[in-house]
Amino acid sequence: MWEKVIEVEGLVKCYGKLVAVNGVSFECYRGEIFSLIGPNGAGKTTTVEILECLRRPTSGSARVLGFDVVGGEREIKKRIGVMPQNFNAFERLTVKENVELLAKIYGVKADIKGLLERMGLWDVRGRRYYTLSGGMKRRVGICMALVSDPEILFLDEPTTGLDPQARRECWEVIRDARRMGKTVFLTTHYMDEVENLSDRASIMIKGKIVATDEVATLIAKYGGGVKVAVKGGKEVEDLLTRFTNNVYRDGFGNIIGVFNSKLEASRALTALYQYSDKCAAEMILPSLEEAFLRLAGGRIDERGELV
Amino acid sequence: MKGTFAIFKALTKVWLRSKTGIFFSFLFPLMLLLTFGTVFGGGQAAKYQLYIQNFDLDDNGEPTELSKTLIKALNSTESFDIKNLDVEVNITEYMRAHPSFTSYRFLIIPKGFQQKAMNKTVSARVGVIIDTLLKIEEIYGKYMDGESRQRVKEGREALSAWRNKTLTAEEAEILLLTEEGDTSAPTIKGIVYSVINALNNALVGAEEIVSVTSKPIVEKLLTAADYYLPGYIAAFIMTNGIIGVTSNVAEYRRNGVVKRLAATPLPKSSWILGNILQQTALAFLLTLIMLAVGWFVFGIRSLPDVYALLLIFIGAVTFCSIGMFLGGVIRDVEAAYGAGNAIAFPMMFLSGSFWPIEIMPNYLQTVAKLLPLYYFHDGLRKAMMLRIPQHTITSFIILGALAALFTVLAVKVTRWKELD
C-alpha cells in the first residue's frame, strides 16, 4: 500500500574536507508531499541534488523509483521533474516557449495550454520570463517541472524570497500537483510551509537527519504540551497552579502553564476569564516551530539561518 | 538530436531578442564595412601632401623657369597634393599654427636654384667637350698634322680656362624636409629623386635608355570592400565565439539555466552541439548580410565558393568551441567576459584581419601567424577574393585541428554534474 519511491540509506557527501551530508537515511512514499526542513547549510540542497542525479554521492546509497542514482541517471531523469534552487529559465524566451522547450527536451506531447491554465499562467504565456514577478517565475518553474508528467516533483526551496501572497499561491500550485497524483519532494526552511503542505518531513541539521515522521506526529512528539499564556501577578499564577503543576514565567513577563490536553487547558482558561474578563489569556497549541526548537536547539530566522 | 535542435532554436531566439547581441554580431561589423569600404574605397590611390616653398624668384618676384618646370614635373607624377607656401612663411610657425594628423613634408627650392643649375649644366656640357677633345688628341692626334693638333689643343685649353674662370661647379640643391616617424617619407623621397634624376638627364641632354610601363595586375577590378569583407567576416565570427559564447555560457551556468537543463534527460553533448549549431547559423547569416550590403553598396565581386563556405563553417566551430572551453574553465561571469575581450580584441588587430600584415613590423607578422584568426581570414581571402583555393589548405588543416581540439576540451570542461 505504501509504495516507496525514494529510499536513502547512509548517504554521505563530502566536498574536500567538508562533510555536507553525513550518513542520511529516509524514505518517501508515492503520492505524498515530503519536506526536508532545515537551516541554510544543513545539506538539504546537496541531498536533493544527489536524488536529481546532479551530484555524485561520496558513499551510501540512494534509489529513486527503484533506480540507483549512480548508473540510473537516464532512467531517473526521464521520470522526475525538477525546480532547482534559485531557479531560472531562459530570460528572453516567453513563459510558453520555456515550457515548450522542456516538453521538446523530454520528447513529450504535453497539454501545455491546460497546464498553463491550471497554474494561472495562460494569460501571461506571451510575456518574456525576465519581466515576470518572483512568484510567477516560480510557478513557471513548477510548470516546466510538470510538463513531462513526472512521477516525482523535486522543488528545492520553492518559496524562498517570495512575499506571503506569492507564497500562498505557490502552495496552491504545489497542492494541485499532488492532486494530479505527483509525489512532491520539497526542501524548505519555512515551518509554516511544512505545516501547511507536508504529509511527512525530515528535520535536517548540520548534515544529519534528527527526526523523520508525519508532520502531525512530529508536532505531537516534540511540539511540547498545550500552553496557556497570561499576563498578571501572584493571584493569577496561583490560579493556574490549581490546574497544573507545570507553571513558569518566560522572559517577556508571561506566566505560562503547560497542560496535557486542550480540554485541561480550556478549563484553566475558563477559570482565568471567570476571575477577570479583562485578563489577556490565550491558548498556544504545539507547533512544528516548537518541535524544531527542541530537536535542533534553535530557531530558523527569516533568512534561513539557525539562531 | 531533438534536444540539440530544441536548444539551437531556443538559443537562436534568445540571441535574436538581444539588442547587444544583434549590435555586436551584425550592426558593428556592418558599420565597419561601410566606414572602411568608403574611406579606402575612393577608387584612386591616396595622394601625399607636399608643401613647396619656392625662393627661386626672378627680379619681378615670379618663379624662375626651371623651378616652375620642377614643380610641374612633381605634379605630373600624380603622387602629390601640392600646396605652395609664400616665401615669407616660417615653416616652424606654420606647423605650430596648423596642427595636423598627417605628417608635414616641405620641399624648399632655394634662391639661385635656376642659376646654379644652368651653370652646372653648362659646366657639365663644357666638361664633356673638353673630355671629347682630350680623347681626340690622344687617339687621333698621331694622324693629324702638327698645326691641326696645336689648334685643337689651344681650343681645349682656352675652353678649360674659360670654364675655370667663369663657371662655378656648385650644385643646385633643393631641400626635402620630412617629419620624424613619417612612414611615407621613404616613398616620397624616392618619387622626388626620380623626378630630379629625370630633370638632370634632360638638362645634360642624355637620352632615356630604360623606360617603365605600368599596368594594374588583375584584370577584374576589386574594390576595397572586396578586401575588407573576408577579414570582417572572419573577425566577427571570432568575436561572436570568443566573447559571445564565453560570456553566455558562463552566465547560463551562473543563473541556473545549465542546472535546469542538466536535470532533464538532455545529454551534455546536445547542449554543446546546440551552441555550435547556433554559432554556425549566426556565421552564415553574418556572411549573407555582409555580402548583401557589400554587393549593394560597393558592388563587390568576391562571392564565397564552396571552399569559403566550408571554411566559414570550420571557423565558426573553432571559435565557438574555444568560447565553450573558456566559459567552462572560467567560473566567474565577469572574468569570463573580461577574458573573452582580452583574447578577442588583440587577436582581431594583431592577426591583420583589417589590413595586410605586410605593413606590420616583422616581429608582429610572426605573432600574427601564431593566431588562429590569421589562418581564418587569410584562407577566406584566398578563397573569396583571390580565387586560389589550393592555397587555403594550411587554413583548413590548422582550423580543423583547433576545432577538433577545442571541441574535445569543451566537452571535458563543461560540467553536467557538481555544477557549483
Image: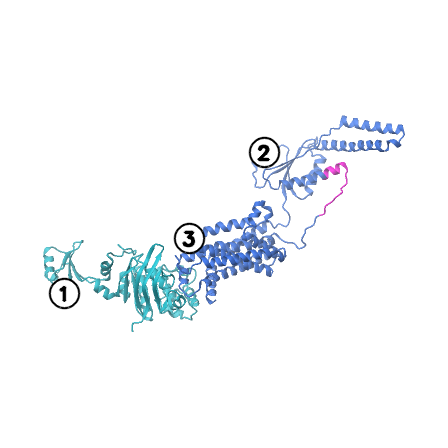
Q: Position of residue A77 (x, y in %)?
A: 39, 66
When the figure is inspected, residue B37 is found, relative to residue B198, above or below; the finding is below
Quadrant showing the C terminus of chain A: bottom left
Q: Colour of chain B?
A: blue
Q: Earlier in the sequence, mark 3 or mark 2?
A: 2
Q: Is residue A251 left or right of residue A174?
A: left
- Mark 1 — residue? A264
Q: Which mark is residue B92?
A: 2
Q: CA distance from mark 1 to mark 3?
A: 61 Å
Instruction: Report the magenta residues as a range.
Output: B198-213
Residue located at (59% from left, 37% from top): B180
Q: Amino acid at mark 2?
A: Thr
Which mark lies nearer to you, 1 or 3?
3
Circle 2 crowding by C-alpha within 10 Å: few under 14, some 14–19, many from 20: few
Q: Colour of chain A?
A: cyan
Q: Which mark is residue A198?
A: none
Disc 1 sits on a residue from what chain? A
Element type at mark 2: helix
Residue located at (41% from left, 67% from top): A74
Element type at mark 3: loop
Q: Which mark is residue B332?
A: 3
